[in-house]
Image: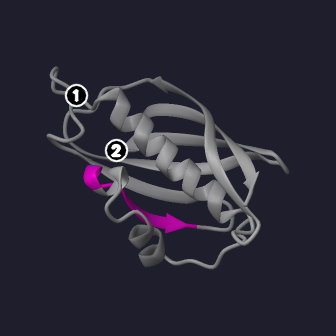
């Protein structure tokens, strides 16, 4: 297990209250020894004028889930993680329903972490892929 913090789904979702994640309706729905899963509704907050999911919304979902994973994988009494770089490729448009993101680390280093995020639609089809690099900072 990679997690340095004990948590449950309620704690993950409470952590995001009154943030951008909360505003967009991002909620954590599952986790395991080395992954997190969250969902986001496709609605007026996450659509662009063309009626499909806004790329910024999918990028927010990717950074939200990846940065949460990063911060859970360090000792919070000594370190915290912040985003350094994010890349996202949009593969398929989504017009309604919700999307589901899963993140796992590629690399957990002393000064940086790299997280992979896949976003899929409710049919399990790939919507976006992202790579998030996090900086690990001392408190």
Mark number, residue 18:
none
Query: Which quarter of the figure is the C terminus placed in?
Result: bottom right
- The residue that appears at 47% across and 76% down in the rendered structure is 11
- Placement of 102 over or under 91, stated as above or below: below
Query: Which quarter of the figure is the N terminus placed in?
Result: bottom right
- The residue that appears at 51% across and 78% down in the rendered structure is 8
- The residue that appears at 22% across and 28% down in the rendered structure is 52
Q: Position of residue 105 (x, y in %)?
A: 70, 49
Q: Position of residue 5 (x, y in %)?
A: 66, 74
Give yes or no for residue 27 being in the magenta stretch: yes
What residue is shown with label 2?
123
Decide which of 33, 23 is in the foreground and name it: 23
Please identify the residue farthest to the right as the structure is shown.
110
Q: Mark 1: which secondary structure?
A: loop
- Of circles 1 and 2, which is in front? 1
How far, Cα to Cα, is label 1 from label 2? Answer: 16 Å
- The residue that appears at 46% across and 48% down in the rendered structure is 101
- 48 vs 110, left or right, is left
Quarter location, residue 112: top right
What residue is shown with label 1?
52
Q: Position of residue 104 (x, y in %)?
A: 64, 50
Decide which of 90, 134 is in the foreground and name it: 134
Quarter location, residue 31: bottom right
Residue 125 visible here: no
Of the image marks 1 and 2, the number of the one nearer the N terminus? 1
Q: Position of residue 133 (x, y in %)?
A: 67, 37
Task: Please report the bounds of the magenta region as a residue range.
Answer: 23-31
């Amino acid at each position: 297990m990679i997690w340095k913090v004990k948590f449950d789904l309620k704690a993950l979702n409470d952590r995001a209250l009154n943030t951008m994640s909360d505003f967009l309706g991002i909620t954590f729905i599952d986790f395991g020894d080395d992954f997190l899963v969250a969902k986001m509704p496709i609605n007026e907050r996450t659509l662009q004028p063309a009626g499909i999911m806004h790329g910024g919304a999918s990028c927010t979902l990717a950074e939200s889930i990846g940065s949460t994973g990063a911060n859970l994988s360090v000792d919070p009494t000594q370190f915290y993680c912040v985003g350094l770089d994010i890349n996202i490729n949009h593969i398929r448009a989504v017009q309604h329903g919700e999307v589901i993101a899963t993140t796992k680390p590629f690399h957990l280093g002393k000064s940086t972490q790299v997280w992979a995020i896949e976003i899929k639609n409710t049919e399990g089809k790939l919507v976006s892929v992202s790579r998030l690099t996090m900086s690990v900072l001392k408190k």
